[in-house]
Image (spheres, grey):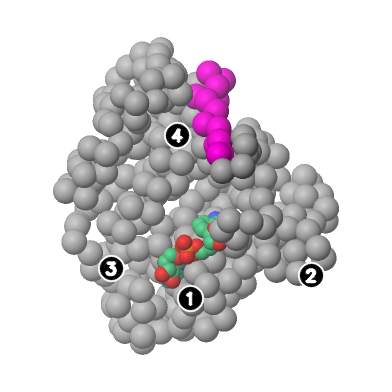
């Protein structure tokens, strides 16, 4: 059956890694219909809008996308495309599986944790204003509805996947109301929904220290938006970097799959970026569609490339000397 999927290449390394990922996905699951969609700085240059109406219409109709990173200027400039997409399509849960990969050398072995990040509230919403010249205010909004929704998601996710423990990172010692509400909801949903799952709370500074000391002790991490953003990159660093960690943004009836990494301006246009994180996001997309066989074939293929560890087939971030295309071709050969 043909499936229609939006393909948002995005900015920087986005077009390179999304083309590589698409080629591998097409080889494993022929017949997908990709709808190319513009978003980000490239879209703004081409048509004056970071999220053109045609992209929104395509997403409204397909409710699913594979998305490359988009650049968001620091300081002045346009608002975040990601924040807008997550709010508009109700993508309230970001799920980032972080796993050690055989053949990718790091300080740790056997890391297997999942970051579950609330994706629509908190400081990350970017609600800011200037109160008077020289004084700005950024709002951290937490709602009971939003906190309960993500807690329910995390405990259901943990139960369905046979996970044993959910750890909440918070700063409720200082942010007594907002993080206090987040904790209150997590505790209650845990008791109601999944008392058999271990539940733990850590103040986030201590949590980060524990993560870098022994990440293998963690299972599912539940975090509000900004903490989830920061801790996701920290966790990527534990298993080989941003080139090897995928992600999904999930709502009730819509899903956008994208890597944790950004547009990597330092690598853009050079054909050097690792497409694996986006390809792994494509595997999550195939699983979401119930295409488990194609997903498993791709996983087996990239795992073989990593395990064999030939420098001419691995990108530089994971110790090789290959470019984006050479890595994708190596995966294609193992399919
Ligand atoms: P970044 O993730 O783009 O890069 C951080 C570091 O990781 C860089 O050294 C980069 O070279 C490396 N890296 C990232 N992806 C890689 C890959 N696939 N292979 C090899 N190395 C890789 O973070 P940044 O530089 O802080 O942000 C750049 C831009 O991306 C900013 O405009 C930011 O707003 C945006 N961003 C977008 C998203 C998204 O669209 N989902 C996520 C994060 C950042």
Residue at the spot x=70%, y=68% of the render? 42
* Position in image of residue 116 (x %, y %): 43, 38
Q: Is residue 331 above or below residue 75?
A: below
Disc 1 crowd rating (10 Å Cα; few below 14, some 14-19, many 20+) is few
Q: Judge left or right: residue 164 versus residue 224.
A: left
Which of pointers 3 and 2 indicates the residue nearer the eye?
Answer: 2
Label 2 or label 4, whichever comes before in sequence order: 2
Q: Is residue 66 above or below residue 207?
A: below
Distance of mark 4 from mark 3, alpha carbons?
29 Å
Q: Is residue 329 visible?
A: no
Task: Give residue 200's quadrant in the image.
Answer: top left
Res 266 label: 1
Which of pointers 3 and 1 indicates the residue nearer the eye?
Answer: 1
Label 3 or label 1, whichever comes before in sequence order: 3
Q: Are marks 2 and 4 in contact (CB under 8 Å)?
A: no
| Residue nearest the viewer, comparing 90 with 2 | 90
Ligand 1 contact, mark 4 (Cβ < 8 Å): no
- Residue on which disc 2 sits: 46
| Residue nearest the viewer, comparing 278 with 330 | 278
Residue at the spot x=66%, y=51% of the render? 79
Label 2 or label 1, whichever comes before in sequence order: 2
Disc 3 crowd rating (10 Å Cα; few below 14, some 14-19, many 20+) is some
- Residue on which disc 3 sits: 104
Q: Is residue 152 above or below residue 291?
A: above
Q: Are marks 2 and 1 in contact (CB under 8 Å)?
A: no
Q: Judge left or right: residue 135 versus residue 326.
A: right
């Amino acid at each position: 059956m043909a499936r229609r999927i939006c393909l948002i290449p995005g900015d920087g390394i986005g077009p390179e890694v999304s083309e590589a990922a698409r080629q591998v996905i097409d080889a494993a699951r022929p017949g997908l219909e990709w709808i190319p969609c513009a978003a980000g700085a490239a879209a703004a240059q081409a048509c004056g809008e970071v999220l053109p109406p045609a992209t929104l219409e395509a997403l409204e109709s397909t409710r699913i996308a594979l998305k490359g990173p988009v650049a968001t200027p620091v300081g002045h400039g346009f608002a975040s495309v990601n924040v807008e997409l997550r709010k508009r399509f109700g993508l309230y849960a970001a799920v980032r599986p972080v796993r050690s990969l055989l053949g990718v050398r790091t300080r740790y072995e056997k890391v297997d944790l999942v970051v579950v990040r609330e994706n629509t509230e908190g400081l990350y919403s970017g609600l800011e204003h200037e109160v008077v010249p020289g004084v700005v205010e950024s709002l951290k909004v937490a709602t009971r509805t939003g906190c309960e929704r993500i807690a329910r998601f995390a405990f259901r996710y943990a139960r369905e996947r046979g996970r044993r423990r959910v750890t909440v990172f918070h700063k409720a010692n200082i942010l007594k109301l907002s993080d206090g509400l987040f904790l209150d909801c997590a505790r209650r949903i845990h008791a109601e929904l999944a008392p058999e799952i271990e539940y733990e709370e850590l103040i986030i500074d201590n949590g980060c220290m524990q993560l870098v000391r022994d990440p293998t002790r963690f299972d599912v991490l539940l975090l509000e938006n900004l903490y989830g953003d920061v801790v996701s990159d920290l966790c990527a660093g534990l298993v080989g970097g941003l080139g090897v960690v995928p992600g999904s943004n999930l709502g009730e009836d819509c899903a956008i799959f994208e890597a944790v990494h950004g547009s990597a301006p330092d690598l853009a246009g050079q054909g050097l970026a690792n497409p694996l994180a986006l390809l792994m996001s494509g595997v999550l997309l195939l699983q979401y569609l119930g295409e488990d066989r194609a997903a498993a074939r791709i996983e087996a293929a990239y795992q073989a490339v990593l395990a064999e560890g030939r420098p001419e087939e691995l990108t530089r971030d994971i110790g090789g000397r290959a470019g984006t295309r050479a890595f994708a071709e190596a995966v294609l050969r193992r399919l």
